[in-house]
Every structure is written in C-alpha cells, then in structure tokens.
Amino acid sequence: MTSNNRLPAIPGTTLFDGEQAKRGYALNKMCFSFNSAENRAEFLRDEEAYMHKYGLDAQQAHAIRVRNVLQLIAAGGNAYYLAKFAGIFGLDMQDIGAQQTGMTKDQFKAKLVAAGK
Amino acid sequence: MAKLIGCIGTSHIPAIGGAIHKGLQQDPYWKPFFDGFPPIREWLGRVRPDVVVIFYNDHGLNFFLDKMPTFAVGAAPQYNNADEGWGIPTLPPFRGELDLSWQIINTLVEKEFDIVSCQEMLVDHACTLPLKLLWPQGDCPVSVVPVCINTVQFPLPKASRVYGMGKAVGEAIATWDSSKTVAVIGSGGLSHQLDGERAGFINKAFDLQFMESLLSNPEWATQFSIHELVEKTGTQGVELLMWLAMRAALTAGQGAGVRKVHSNYHIPISNTATGLLALEKLG
C-alpha cells in the first residue's frame, strides 16, 4: 500500500509516505534546490518566477507565499526540504515549532525544557 | 583481522555546528550537552581507532527523492561536506577507507542486503558533527566509511532489518583482512519532532529505556514497527535506527559483550532530546 491510512493516525503528525510524495514532488524539488546559495538568492530576487520554474501548484505556491509550515506539509512538503526554505529566512526549529503549535517562541522553548523534567 | 573496539551513539543537531564555531561549549545552554564528551574523547585517545564506520541519515544533501536508497555505503576516497541551506559552516573533507568500504559492500550483498554503493558522496551534518564532537581539535584523525539509512521517504526499513544490516557490517569488519582498529558511530536522535502540530514532542521515558536496552538487550527496539517508533519517539526520533545498527555491529563474531564507557542525556538542544552513549567491545 502507498499510504498508512490503515494504521492509527499519530496525533499532529503527517508521515511522508507515497501519497505525500505524489502530492509534493515539485515543492520538495524546489526546496532541495535551496542547498545552493545561488538558488536561494535567485528565489529572493523573484519568488513567483522561481516557483513557476519548479511548477508549484496553486496550493503549494500559496503556502510558500504565506510562509506557513502546516500548509506546506498539507501541500506535500517534506520536513527535510522545508527546513531549507525556513533557513532562507533565518528561522530556526523553535520558530517553526512555535508557528505550527500556535505558541510564542518562548512558550515553545519552555515546553521543550519541561519535557526534560 | 581488523579489530572492532566499540561504538558511540550521539545526537547530531545542526545547531551544534554553530555552537562549536562560536565557542559556546561552556555557555549555560550548551554546557550540559558538551560536558558529556570529555570521558569519551579520553577513551578514544587510549584506544585510537584508525577508521570509523558511521551509520547516519542524509537530510537532503547527497540524496533527493529522485533516487532514494534504503541503505547506501560510501566507497569514495574522500567525502566532502557542503552547504545544506542553514548557514552552518562547511567542514573540511574526510578521508575515506576504500578497502573497508568494499569489504562492507561485498559482505552485505553476500548476506543478501541489496545496498547502493556510492563512489562519490557528500556527507551532511549528521556525518560530520559526530566526528567534530569526538575529535574537536585539528584535522579528523580517522578515516571514514559512511553508511546512510533512509529516513526521508516512507516506507523506512524495518528496525529488525536495520539491526540485521548493522550486524552484517560488524561481520564485515570482523573478517576484514587488515591490522586496523575500527569503531562504529550511530548518529542521530534521540526523541524529537520538528514538523506538524506535534512539533516539540519528546519522550524521555522511552529514550532512557532505549539507551538502557542497548546495554542489556540490544534487540529490544526491533519489536516496534516504524509506525510505532514514530508514535513513540517523534517523526525524527526514528533516527534511533542508527544507534540500533551501531549496536548490532558489536554483536557480530565472538565476544564477551560490552562495557559502558560513558553516557549522557540532556533535554533540550534545539527541539531534541540529546543522547550520548559509548560502549567498549569486550573480548
């Protein structure tokens, strides 16, 4: 099977399975290109042209425009490549975590510390 | 024959690279993490491995979804690090160990593991940072054989299969016609989740149980499916598979078991519960 829809859903978690892969290839390929400093600069000069070059669909392009990680995941984005997109804007994993959980960055960091007690 | 002297499991969070570069090891945030390493470095200074086999997961540097191997063994004379898009400093290249690369490739295929061999390979922070943590000064004194396990595209290999592959790598090392000393590294983990509404998920109880199992019952984690491991340790917590492969390598051949050299566990570094475990192979 290409999806995990027969397995119990894991709360707040999307597994990057075949269904996600089919959905997100163009988005993931674009974000993989951000390994290159030249590509990152080209994206920042003209985001719409760059997204068009990689053939992002409307849902993916919107999620990129609004910089929303949950929407990027819903559009088929894989965390490993989305992290490179976040890196363009100097966002760290606590910024990303705060956005996805609806907390402030300080609240999110406090939650991490609390997990160690 | 070559001598396998032990293993080190360590987290590989990218922020470590920045912390080392800026000299933050004594900073209150970083000190509980970096303080775990001196006893292990002291042990490595005594046992002096020539070569390290590193089980790790590529995070979208060397491989993309277009060609995604489940198990990939490096067979390059040198491994370069490169820009991963997060602004951490690129580290100098690492020397390969071609004879051991081919010994591992030949042994794994003989044992019916259908691996991908890579004669050119970029190595990301998961490979470079453990080496920098264990040998922080000067050039890296060991040569390396990277063994990359897919954690990017589901389906991931089963924990039991990863264990079997690690054990086969241990057998390859044990039958390598060489006078060199070898150590294995498992890079990644422990529990963490970067993506989704469950971002920030950590499971201290499971992590500690996992670390303990590597001493007393190395096959313990193989009972869990990948789905269960994601549920228990987070989407990126499945990196514990690297530790499992590492520990399995030490079960190969004759031996009287393992001795714990040192361990450490600290929450949080970035979003991650950091683990550190060094085991010496006895006998």
Image (cartoon, rainbow, N blue to C red):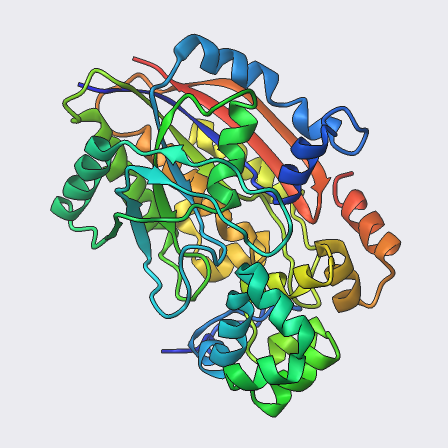
Q: Is residue B128 left or right of residue B49?
A: right
Query: In which quadrant of the rendered image does the C terminus of chain A lie?
Result: top right
Q: Residue at x 44, y 82 (%)?
A: A22
* Front residue of A30 and B112: A30
Q: Is residue B178 left or right of residue A42?
A: left
Q: Where in the figure is residue A4, as x and y percent of width and height?
A: 46, 74
Q: Where in the figure is residue B203, as x and y percent of width and height?
A: 65, 47
The image quarter containing residue B245 is: top left
B186 is higher (above) or lower (below) than B224: above
Query: In which quadrant of the rendered image does the N terminus of chain A lie?
Result: bottom left
* Front residue of B213 and B40: B40
| Res. A43 in view | yes
Q: Is residue B247 left or right of residue B1?
A: right
B33 is higher (above) or lower (below) than B148: above
Q: Is residue A109 left or right of residue B68?
A: right
The image quarter containing residue B190 is: top right
* Front residue of A74 and B135: B135
Q: Where in the figure is residue B160, as x and y percent of width and height?
A: 34, 49
Q: Residue at x 17, y 35 (%)?
A: B103
Q: Where in the figure is residue B141, as x and y percent of width and height?
A: 42, 21
